[in-house]
Image (tube, rainbow, N blue to C red):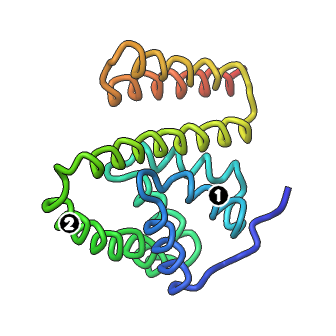
Amino acid sequence: MDKPRENPTVWGLFVLFSRLALIGFGGVMPWARRALVEQKKLLTPEEFAEIFAFAQVLPGPTICNLAIIIGQRRRGVPGAIAAVTGMVLLPSMVVLALGAIYQRVGTVPLVQDVIRGMSVVAAAMVAAMALAMIRSLPLAPVPVLFALAMFAGVGVMHWPLPAVMAVLATAAIAIGHWGKRR
């Protein structure tokens, strides 16, 4: 497997995450994985999955957390600030402009149809990223059981995510501790 090879400058982190945010309408995470793992090779698939998992359990938007973590690892605090600023500055300006336009034309049936179509594309992109991440992970029985338990608890039973995460995290720690004692 290719080792990560690029170490962008602080400015490079700002530009990279600005580009990701600007092209990632409806779901930047699939684009982020492709850019960070496949194109720029800043991370291995395993590193991306690990950072992604950690970023999800932190408060705030997952992609911003991911940008902060990667920026900090590559260029310290200035890198973290540059990455998260790149993730939010230009896209915020675009969102404000599009919001103003939508206020004027949002009730037009064609505009509503376009937005519905974009939501389907966004869902497909997230599903494709999930499949790509699953393929890069080892399919050991215990992690698969935890993934299925999370899916069942949140996706099927509609239990609160923090509660399911707390129970599964406690179980994972207990299993990990028990496994080390053996």
Cα–Cα span, label 2 and label 1? 31 Å
Amino acid bearing label 1: Arg
- Residue 154 x, y percent position in the rendering: 39, 22
**For residue 101, which quarter of the picture?**
bottom left
Q: Is mark 2 on a helix, strand or loop?
A: helix
**For residue 105, which quarter of the picture?**
bottom left
Which numbered marker is on residue 34? 1
- Residue 20 x, y percent position in the rendering: 50, 67
Q: Nearer the viewer, mark 2 or mark 1?
A: 2
The relative height of residue 111 versus residue 68 in the rendered view (above or below) is above
Please state if 63 lies on the left or on the right of 43 as rendered.
left
Q: What element carries label 1?
A: helix
Earlier in the chain: of badge 2 and badge 1, it is: 1
Q: Which of 72 and 88 is in front in this view?
A: 88
Amino acid bearing label 2: Ile
Please state if 135 lies on the left or on the right of 80 as rendered.
right
**The C terminus sits in image quarter:** top right
Total marks placed? 2
